Image (spheres, coloured by chain):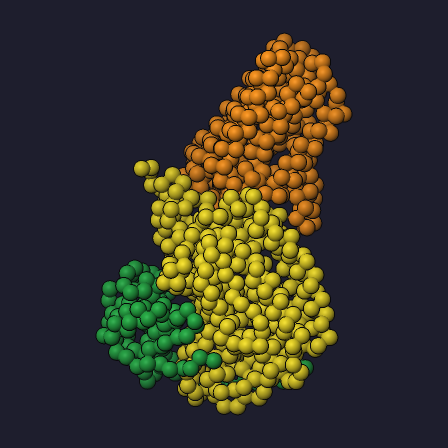
Chain colours: A green, B orange, C yellow
Amino acid sequence: MDPQVFFPAVKTEVVEIAQRNKALGYRFAQMHCVKTPSEMFIIYTFEKQDLSIEQYRIPAETDGAVPSVSGVFLAAVLYENEISELYGVEFTGMAIDFGGTLYETAKPRAFAEVAAPVKKTPVKQAAVAE
Amino acid sequence: MDVTAATVIGILIYLAAAPVVGGLLAGADRVVSARMQGRYGPPLLQPFYDVLKLWQKENIVVNRQQKVYILGFFVFVVIAGCILFGGGDLLLAVFALTLASVFLIVAAYSTFSPYAHIGAEREMIQMVSYEPMVILTVVGMYMATGSFSSVDIARHDGMLFLHLPFIFLGFLFILTIKFRKSPFDISMSHHAHQEIVRGLTTEFSGRDLALIEIAHWYENVFLLGMVYLFFAPVPVVAVIVTLAAYFLEVFIDNNNARLKWQHALASSWAVTLVLGVSNVVLLAFR
Amino acid sequence: MGERTIIPFGPQHPVLPEPLHLDLILEDEKVVGAVPSIGFIHRGLEKLVEKRDFQEMAFVIERICGICSFIHGQGYVQTIEAVMGVEIPERAKYLRSFWGELSRVHSHLLWLGLMADAFGFESLFMHCWRVREKVLDIFEETTGGRVIFSVCKVGGLWKNVDDDTLRRIGGVLKDVEKDIRPLTDVFMRDYTVQKRCVGLGVLTKDEAFQLGAVGPMLRASGVAMDARKLGYAAYGDMEFEPVTENAGDCQARIAVRAREIYQSLDIIRQCIEKMPGGEVAVPVKGSPQGEYLSRLEQPRGEAVYYGKGNGTKYLDRFRVRTPTFANLIPLLHIIPGCDLADVPLLALTIDPCISCTER
């Protein structure tokens, strides 16, 4: 399985990281945002043709601004729109800006509110069928 | 055209029998297609059930003008058939059918749907594709028999097919377009799984759609009547060839993808020029 | 220059398997631009991690999509097993590969049928789906479900399949292969199919790689990337190479998926031959703590699964990056310049699974 290394970085470095990886032959694989009660960060994944990946963890906050990498990798545009719509992170300089209409959820920034876990009785796990 | 008793009887038989025959042929088409596709398929009388159901549906139209045009389409298809089966001028019958198609196109344009408009555009291109061949067929029959009258053509000595073999083949080719079968079901596929939804008839519903369906039955009987004319002196052979031609179209439909209008236009004109013109030239030098 | 009209394509459209909306800007019948809209089927499933414990969440992730359902479930449990450091038995790995490859066969058959429907070849569509029924019958026999199997769990599998059944299934699959041959022959050689598909929607090798295309979309342009080569589940023991073509057009993508069906049937045969004995599950104690990102090869391309646990039985985050999400930008790249008649072909050529895209 892949070694799981998430290089820490800050948001001002993202464009430079993207350009450096592009020069090394990586392409943009995906990015996503994680928000827990204690922290919030964005993970960028870059992928090479031999299936190796490099990942970066960027701290972020709702209503904070992060420079967009869609100038380097057009493919990033959908992911950035998704994160900005669901988590409220603003990406400056997106190549295509859906303006919050990508999913048009009834409640804006639906994923930005992290609920405390629901207390309920544990599920009885069925025995393994033979 | 002398209106004799035979004319009137011919017209009456056509008016009464054509929808029944057309509907049964449509039903047979669906059953045979289903079996070719490995399915069970609908009952043979399904087209009749469909038309009856459509007749009972509520008519939801945005624009009432389309009813007039659809009625025009229906009336002129029936008139074209009456002229053919009543012993009238074949060229007039063909042009009556063309007029009917124009009515259908105008009906599609009168709706506000972009799908219907594009369907209408494609239908016009289809007409440009098949009209030359149809007219050459009638011209060929005239050159072989000396008359445009369908009665005279039917009573001609010897099978017309022997004088017009290439024209017959060309006519079979464009029959695929007229019957709206793949590869040329471009403007209005029976299966609705194409990019312009239902194409020409997207906005039609209820009784209008039922009327269009019945008009298609009349039209199919007309077209098969023209195939019959090639073999008229020997009725048994004629009936067999006519039915075989119909099921050949069903077979072709099930074995081809749908082509684009550019292919339909180019191939029809190529066939018309090669088969149709060569046959006419041969007849001229006979 | 002709008059410009805007034709709405979708979300309800007979040719689309799932709701996708494209506003096509047409000049006569040529498409000069497309404005996409998604979001008709966004259910926010990823947020359910807050309410379902990590074993139950597998059932939610399976239901992201009906076609890719098994591999979503597999991706989820694989990720959580990696987070928790759980090592599952060999037989479970092999059975997961077995079902995964059967999923690939059924998905590609479904797609071939839809593609035939898009270019108006209804009888080919019906035959492809008729053959697919045999594969679905195998699923029902081994897992109890035709579409959603609910057979993967953290720690292994809920169900086992005995060796006699597997051998019999191997025989059934030989018949399935014989049935599929004439169908793929039509796809690759029929005159009208080629007239519609050759030269359509060309994506060059560079474009495909840079724009983020995955799966057959990428491999048909000559880039040999297949996430199964990472060696997860039993793929490390299987012999196969990524199927590639070079033309990068619709016909090449049809060819890649058709050849992948045969490759999958071959991998299944290898699985059945090499299937180890033993249990299919290990008990799992405790809760996930830590994060992990894994990649699996869905029929539509590479899917990325990220899981983060915080020591309680509810995960912090589970993220699925589905292949169609990555293929949407290449789709928007190949649409301008085609005819209206080609739009359904292009929309289907990426193998769209919009329920996966939107989750």
Vertical relation: A123 (above or below) B114: below
Question: Which of B172/C319 is in front?
Answer: B172
Residue at 63% in and 36% down: B249
Residue at 52% in and 49% down: C118
Residue at the top extreme, as displayed:
B2
**Picture coordinates of residue B182, whole percent (x, y):** 57, 40
Residue at the bottom extreme, as displayed:
C285
Question: Which of A54/C281 is in front?
Answer: A54
Q: How many marks?
A: 0
**Picture coordinates of residue B265, whole percent (x, y):** 49, 33
Which quadrant would residue B56 be assigned to in this image? top right
**Picture coordinates of residue C262, whole percent (x, y):** 60, 62
Name the side, left or right, on which C309 lies relative to B210: left
Name the side, left or right, on which C354 lies relative to C238: left
Which quadrant would residue C258 be assigned to in this image? bottom right
Residue at 57% in and 17% down: B281
Vertical relation: C25 (above or below) A67: above
Name the side, left or right, on which B10 lies relative to A111: right
Taking the image as drawn, is residue B281 in sight?
Answer: yes
Question: Which of B162/C241 is in front?
Answer: C241
Vertical relation: C132 (above or below) B32: below
Taking the image as drawn, is residue C106 in sight?
Answer: no
Residue at the right extreme, as displayed:
B236
**Picture coordinates of residue C156, whole percent (x, y):** 58, 82
Q: Which quarter of the rendering shows the C terminus of chain B?
A: top right
Q: Which quarter of the rendering shows the N terminus of chain B?
A: top right
Residue at 64% in and 39% down: B250
